Image (cartoon, rainbow, N blue to C red):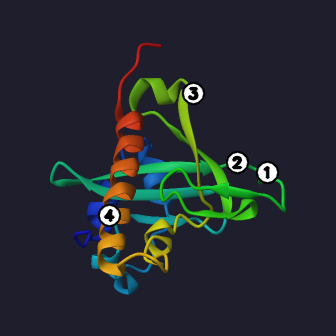
Amino acid sequence: MQPLTADQIRASFVNASGDEIERMPLPGLHEVIWDQREYLGWRDPQTRLGYLVHWADGRPVGIVLRAAAGSLRPGIQAMCSFCHSPQPATQVRMFSAPRAGESGRNGNTIGAYVCEDLGCSHLIRIAPPHASAPEAIAARGAALLARVSNFTAEVRSTISD
């Protein structure tokens, strides 16, 4: 992933109001290892909000996500829709994202089960023991970015209300 500045991040959001963007906490950008990320994802520790930014068509695209209040039932397995990593269900959460524009302001959302900490880029770098690590990570990274891109494209798409 190409590095981002705070201004680029704030300007990238397609489904947030100016007030929401102003209140949005930013992660420690100086700590991000950009070349080991397909997207930048973080949570607001004070709310159920999450944020995701990735590059699409040469520019950053950001979306606001809201975590569901409840979690999946403990003791079962779940799979993240983005990284396809199986893990305990308590580490996967339903996130919804308002669609961009009028549709989102009218309450239209889409959702997906995603790693609760939005840390998919870290999980895909844990290569399976039978795979060649660099090739496996590259393939998993490309698949992760494709699924994230498809999700944000759905958020950005306009539908008739």
| Residue of label 4 | 139
| Residue of label 1 | 70
Q: Quadrant of residue 77?
A: bottom right
Foreground residue among 36 and 14: 36
| Residue of label 3 | 107
Residue type beneath disc 4? Ala
Residue shown at 27%/77% (left/top)? 35
Location of residue 121 in the rendering, given as x and y in whole percent from the top left corner: 43, 70
Specify which label sits upstream in the sequence, 4 or 2.
2
Name the side, left or right, on which 133 lies relative to 95. left
How crowded pointer 2 is (Cα within 10 Å; few <14, some 14-19, many 20+) is rated as some
Q: Which element is circle 1 on? A: loop
Residue shown at 33%/77% (left/top)? 36
Of the two numbered discs 3 and 4 in the rendering, the one whose residue sits closer to the viewer: 4
Residue shown at 77%/54% (left/top)? 71
Specify which label sits upstream in the sequence, 3 or 1.
1
Foreground residue among 34 and 99: 34
Cα–Cα gap, marks 1 and 2 = 6 Å
Residue type beneath disc 2? Ala
Of the two numbered discs 4 and 2 in the rendering, the one whose residue sits closer to the viewer: 4
- Pointers 1 and 2 in contact (CB under 8 A)? yes
From the image, which quarter does the N terminus lie in? bottom left
Residue shown at 53%/35% (left/top)? 110
Q: Which element is circle 2 on? A: loop
Residue type beneath disc 3? Gly
| Residue of label 2 | 68
